[in-house]
Image (cartoon, rainbow, N blue to C red):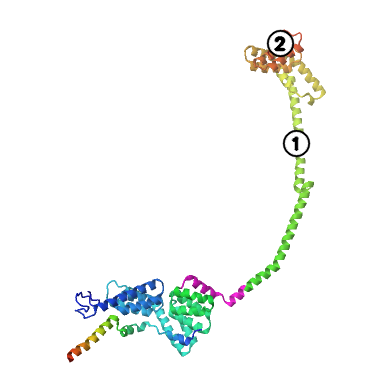
């Protein structure tokens, strides 16, 4: 067995032979101390500082040297604004001269914030003074002192509780609730604050909530208590006023807005009808503009045609003059090439006669030349060139003596190109138009062969 | 409604900074072990006395 008092180990009896302490009782006390310490830790973790303070005070009563419990007790006191009690516990804890004891750090931390420490001490002094003033009947002065105390140390739970009690006694539940809420926010299950909350929550619902608060001051209950505290008669009156004003304004303004909108709709509808009519009648701005542009376009087209006709006439006259020059120069082929393109309708009667004269002079010569070129190309096997020359020769021919030969050669060319219908037509023209042609019998034979082929 | 005069009796003075030293000395830091020790010692004294008497 180990003596809890002096640490001496012994085997016989329950009394320590060294310090004469009862080791069994000391062990029991030590275990009780640990149990209270555990309770205190659990309560402190939940934010139930008043319960933690009770348990930890019992803990050190069983074992004054439990410096860990003293340190925690100091923290719990500090949390509820009792900074001097906190400091006292840390000083005692530190006096045990145990290594790695954080009490010294706590004290140093407070001393480093001298201004805050001073304010907290002033808050306690004001509270003590207020308590005396209350007992002397100077309630107003006491309330002023207490309010200042809570301002100096917002965590001062006991100050909040005393203010709550005072305001409840005055019937000012709203102010009482404010301080109850403040106290419970710091110390979740402070018994005084919970009692006051039950007192101010006099209706049935709040009485039911009391049970909930007893088991834990949860956020929803706190929010509800806070919300209720804000629902003041002045606020309700103000809100009702706002609603009525809004309703009256809406009732007065809404018809005017409706009329205005109706008028705008009518205006727009009449505008649409007007535009539709104008569009149908062609009197709309767009239709007028369109018609104007159409007229302008027609005028310009007519002018353009006029200019083109004048230019063409000039070209035709120039071509006729050139054809005359070529004819005089004996260049009948070139003259005929120009003359064939002339439009006789654009010329005067004299000019028409001149054109006819020039054509009759140049066409037979030019036609024969083209026939001879074509025949030469045909004989050379250049059928494409041959066809071009022969067709040109035909354009100059009438009843000239080269025309039947030209038709016959074109018939042969068509046969070679397997255009038998065209070939039949050429051969047919030789037979029908040139009965005394030198190629009549050959054309007839060819035609019969093609007809026999089908 | 609470009776404030009765309610205020539940409140006591709170230790101020200037009173800490005096408070520590006056407490004498007794715990239950000290008390048990005291009880044991006070119980032993009469026994010793009685043996002397015998």
Q: Is residue A331 visible?
A: no
Q: Secondary structure at mark 2?
A: helix
Judging by the rendered image, the residue that carries numbered circle 2 is: A448
Q: Which circle, 2 or 1, is nearer the viewer?
A: 2
Given residues A185 and A246, the one toward you in this image is A185
Point out the tag, 2 or 1, that comes first from the N-terminus. 1
Q: Main secondary structure of the magenta part?
A: helix
Q: Residues within 10 Å of mark 2 (few under 14, many from 20)?
A: some
For the C terminus of chain A, the image quarter is top right
Q: Which mark is residue A46?
A: none
**Residue ID at (78%, 20%):** A355
Judging by the rendered image, the residue that carries numbered circle 1 is: A301
Q: Secondary structure at mark 1?
A: helix
> What's drawn in magenta, residue-wise?
A217-239
Q: Is residue A334 visible?
A: yes
Query: Residue at the bottom extreme?
Result: B53
Q: Residue A401 at what x, y percent from top left?
A: 74, 11
Q: Residue A40 at what x, y percent from top left?
A: 36, 74
Chain holding disc 1: A
**The magenta stretch spans residue A141:** no
**The magenta stretch spans residue A233:** yes
Chain holding disc 2: A
**Disc 2 versus disc 1: distance between alpha carbons?**
55 Å
Q: Is residue A443 above or below residue A102?
A: above
- Whether the residues at callouts 2 and 1 have beta carbons within 8 Å, the answer is no
Given residues A174 and A384, the one toward you in this image is A174
- Residue A243 sits in quarter: bottom right
Q: Residue A313 at what x, y percent from top left?
A: 76, 28
């Amino acid at each position: 067995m180990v003596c809890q008092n002096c640490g001496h180990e012994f085997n016989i009896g329950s009394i320590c032979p060294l310090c004469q302490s009862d080791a069994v009782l000391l062990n029991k006390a030590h275990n009780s101390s640990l149990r209270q310490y555990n309770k205190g830790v659990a309560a402190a973790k939940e934010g139930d500082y008043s319960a933690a303070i009770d348990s930890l005070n019992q803990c050190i009563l069983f074992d004054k040297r439990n410096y860990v419990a003293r340190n925690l007790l100091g923290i719990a006191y500090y949390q509820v604004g009792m900074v001097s009690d906190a400091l006292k516990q840390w000083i005692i804890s530190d006096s045990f001269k145990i290594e790695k004891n954080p009490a010294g750090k706590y004290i140093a931390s407070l001393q480093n914030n001298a201004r805050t420490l001073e304010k907290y001490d002033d808050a306690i002094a004001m509270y003590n003074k207020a308590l005396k003033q209350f007992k002397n009947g100077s309630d107003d002065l006491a309330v002023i002192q207490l309010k200042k105390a809570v301002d100096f140390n917002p965590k001062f739970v006991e100050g909040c509780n005393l203010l709550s009690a005072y305001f409840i006694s005055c019937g000012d539940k709203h102010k009482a609730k404010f301080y109850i809420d403040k106290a419970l926010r710091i110390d979740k299950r402070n018994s005084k604050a919970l009692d006051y909350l039950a007192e101010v929550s006099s209706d049935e619902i709040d009485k039911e909530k009391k049970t909930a608060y007893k088991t834990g001051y949860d956020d929803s209950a706190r929010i509800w208590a806070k919300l209720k505290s804000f629902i003041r008669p002045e606020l309700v009156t103000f809100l009702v006023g706002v609603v009525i004003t809004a309703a009256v304004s809406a009732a007065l303004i809404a018809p005017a807005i409706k009329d205005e909108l109706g008028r705008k709709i009518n205006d727009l509808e009449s505008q649409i009808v007007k535009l539709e009519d104008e569009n149908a009648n062609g009197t709309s701005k767009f239709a007028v503009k369109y018609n104007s542009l159409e007229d302008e376009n027609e005028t310009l087209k007519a002018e353009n045609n006029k200019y083109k006709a004048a230019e063409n006439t000039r070209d035709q006259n120039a071509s006729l003059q050139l054809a005359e020059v070529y004819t005089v120069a004996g260049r009948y082929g070139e003259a005929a090439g120009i003359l064939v393109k002339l439009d006789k309708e654009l010329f005067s009667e004299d000019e028409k006669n001149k054109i006819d004269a020039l054509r009759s002079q140049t066409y037979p010569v030019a036609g024969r030349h083209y026939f001879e070129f074509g025949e030469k190309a045909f004989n050379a096997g250049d059928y494409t060139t041959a066809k071009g020359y022969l067709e040109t020769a035909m354009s100059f021919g009438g009843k000239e003596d080269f025309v039947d030969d030209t038709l016959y050669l074109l018939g042969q060319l068509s046969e070679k190109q397997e255009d038998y219908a065209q070939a039949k037509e050429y051969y047919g023209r030789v037979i029908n138009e040139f009965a005394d042609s030198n190629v009549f019998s050959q054309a007839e034979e060819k035609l019969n062969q093609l007809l026999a082929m089908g | 409604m609470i009776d404030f005069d009765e309610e205020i009796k539940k409140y006591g003075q709170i230790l101020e900074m200037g009173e800490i030293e005096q408070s520590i000395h006056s407490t004498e830091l007794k715990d239950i072990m000290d008390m048990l020790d005291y009880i044991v010692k006070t119980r032993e004294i009469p026994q010793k006395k009685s043996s002397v008497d015998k």
